[in-house]
Image: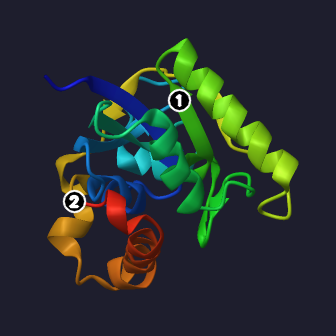
């Protein structure tokens, strides 16, 4: 019987993050959305202004018997820059921050352990600034943001930004892909 679990991550543009995690074995659903802000039911337009406090995130449903939270974090830290505060590439603002919203104490413990280890190893050459916080309310993004890469893979942004992330994912985590 499957062991359903949730993980909620922000690592810049949710289109990128959704495409990455959708490719992993054991991941059954990835929903783009917003979390971590003050207002209920924010819109993409409000998020883009950067004044709601929300981050663009994905909520990942996964079978913990197939893929562990630790493995999801390995992919998370390998597919974005966790050393930049409020920025991923050309995307700048608090909505693009690196964040792990944990759903339970075990996720918090694992996230903190990995972050501490990465900083001790100085793997990135500068400190990992990823926020680790309890999961707040999650608001699914508008329908046109869901499955964005799968539906719009030929768009210039998808080709220039998302495709290279997927190529890196394929090179590093090939055995874990669907």
Residue situated in front as seen by the camera: 91 or 70: 70
- Residue 62 visible in the displayed image: yes
Please determine whether, in this image, residue 71 is positioned above or below residue 13.
above
Q: Report the residue marked by disc 1.
A: 101
Q: Distance between the residues labelled 1 and 2?
A: 25 Å
Q: Quadrant of the C terminus?
A: bottom left
Front: mark 1 or 2 = 2
**Secondary element at tag 1:** strand
Residue 167 placed where, x, y %? 40, 78
Determine the residue positioned at 72% across, 40% down.
115
**Element assignment for label 2:** loop
Q: Where is residue 81 in the image (x, y as percent from the top left)?
A: 65, 61
Residue 3 position in % (x across, y down): 24, 23
Rendered image quadrant of residue 28: top left
Please report the residue visible at 41 percent of the width from the left and 36 percent of the height from the top.
68
Position of the N terminus, as image quadrant, is: top left
Q: Which comes sooner in the sequence, label 1 or label 2?
A: 1
Residue that lies at the very extreme toward the top in this rendered image? 105
Q: Residue 178 carries which label?
A: 2
């Amino acid at each position: 019987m499957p062991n359903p679990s949730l993980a909620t991550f922000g690592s810049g543009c949710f289109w990128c993050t959704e495409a990455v995690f959708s490719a992993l074995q054991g991941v059954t659903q990835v929903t783009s959305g917003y979390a971590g802000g003050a207002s209920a039911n924010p819109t993409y337009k409000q998020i883009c202004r950067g004044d709601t406090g929300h981050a663009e995130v994905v909520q990942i449903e996964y079978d913990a018997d197939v893929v562990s939270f630790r493995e999801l974090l390995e992919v998370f830290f390998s597919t974005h820059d966790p050393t930049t505060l409020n920025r991923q590439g050309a995307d700048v603002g608090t909505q693009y921050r690196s964040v792990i919203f944990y759903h339970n104490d075990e996720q918090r413990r694992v996230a903190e352990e990995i972050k501490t280890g990465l900083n001790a190893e100085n793997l990135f050459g500068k400190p990992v600034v990823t926020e680790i916080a309890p999961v707040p309310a999650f608001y699914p993004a508008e329908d046109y943001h869901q499955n964005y890469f799968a539906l719009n893979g030929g768009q210039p942004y998808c080709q220039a930004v998302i495709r290279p992330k997927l190529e890196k994912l394929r090179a590093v985590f090939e055995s874990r892909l669907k």
